[in-house]
Amino acid sequence: MIKAPTAGAARFLLTAVVPVALITSFPADALRGTWTMGTLGVAAAVSLGFVVGSRWAWNRSLANYTSASS
């Protein structure tokens, strides 16, 4: 019987292995010239989504901020 991964293994996989794989594979593909216009479009859309989402989270956090001395 195969055991399910523990929380520690999942944490390591999602915080170390997956980011390193993404950080190294996408730039390597771009340098080799194997990106298609579709890949470039998806990368641009995901980047824009993260920019918009982080801006929204920042503004929402600022609107709900109360200082520790208030």
Image (cartoon, helix red, strand yellow):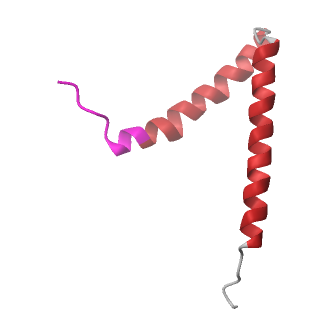
Most common secondary structure along the magenta stretch: loop
- Region of the chain picked out in magenta, as a range: 1-10
List x then y, in percent, for residue 27. Answer: 74, 22
Q: Judge whether 26 appears above or below 51 on screen.
A: above
Q: Judge whether 7 appears above or below 67 on screen.
A: above
Which residue occupies the foreground of this view, 58 or 10?
58
Residue at 79% over, 45% down: 51
Residue 2 located within the stretch drawn in magenta: yes
Would you say residue 30 is visible in this rendering?
Answer: no
Q: Which image quadrant is residue 59 in? A: bottom right
Q: Judge whether 66 appears above or below 32 on screen.
A: below
Q: Which image quadrant is residue 43 in? A: top right
Residue 16 located within the stretch drawn in magenta: no
Residue at 32% over, 35% down: 5
Would you say residue 25 is visible in this rendering?
Answer: yes
Q: Which image quadrant is residue 10 in? A: top left
